[in-house]
Amino acid sequence: MSRVRVIVVGIVLLLAAYVGSYLALLDPIEVGDGGLYRWSSCRVPAYRAGSDFADAVFRPAAWVDRQVRPDYWAWREEVWESPAGVAKPATCRNDWAAQRS
């Protein structure tokens, strides 16, 4: 086997080990923001081991993952209707003034 071929096979095996480690350690968490009738959330990369070290090492893999699977990592919004007879909460000062009169 030529020296170049050995180097190429070695690089391919290292990349496969890197991607496999990323997928094995990836444990995304959902973070969100919202209120009583609306919730927005997205996934954030988190890892089963290594926390800060894993975050630094796998940052390129996470970037590629966001490019490959944008829908998986995108913000999602859920909106619920208020139950019958339950007033929606006031969202601004003008609503509070209208409710008092």
Image (cartoon, grey):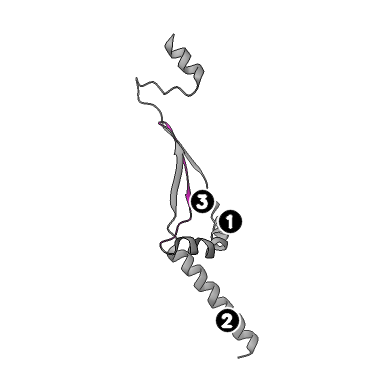
Report the Cα–Cα distance between label 1 and label 3. 9 Å
Report the Cα–Cα distance between label 2 and label 3. 32 Å
Foreground of the two, 12 or 31: 31
Residue type at the position of mark 1: Gln
Question: Which label belongs to residue 14?
Answer: none
Q: Answer yes or no: do the residues labelled 2 and 3 have beta carbons within 8 Å?
A: no
Which residue in the protein does label 3 denote? 73
Residue in view at x 50 percent, y 51 percent: 72
Q: In terms of secondary structure, where does tag 1 sit? A: helix
Answer few, some or many: residues within 10 Å of disc 3's Cα (few below 14, many 20 plus, some between 14 and 19).
some
Q: Quadrant of residue 3?
A: bottom right
Residue type at the position of mark 2: Val
Residue in view at x 42 percent, y 58 percent: 27
Boundaries of the magenta span: 36-48
Q: Position of residue 12 (x, y in %)?
A: 57, 76
Q: Position of residue 2 (x, y in %)?
A: 63, 90
Tell me which numbered mark, 2 or 3, is placed earlier along the sequence: 2
Tell me which numbered mark, 2 or 1, is placed earlier along the sequence: 2
Compared across the picture, whether 6 is left or right of 80 comes to: right
Residue found at the far top of this picture: 101
Answer few, some or many: residues within 10 Å of disc 2's Cα (few below 14, many 20 plus, some between 14 and 19).
few
**Residue 37 falls inside the magenta stretch:** yes
Which residue in the protein does label 1 denote? 67
Label total for image: 3
Which residue in the protein does label 2 denote? 9
Answer few, some or many: residues within 10 Å of disc 1's Cα (few below 14, many 20 plus, some between 14 and 19).
few
Q: Answer yes or no: do the residues labelled 1 and 3 have beta carbons within 8 Å?
A: no
Q: In terms of secondary structure, where does tag 2 sit? A: helix
Q: Position of residue 97 (x, y in %)?
A: 47, 14
Vertical comparison of 56 with 16: above or below: above
- Indicate the quadrant containing the C terminus: top left, top right, bottom left or bottom right: top left
Q: In terms of secondary structure, where does tag 3 sit? A: helix
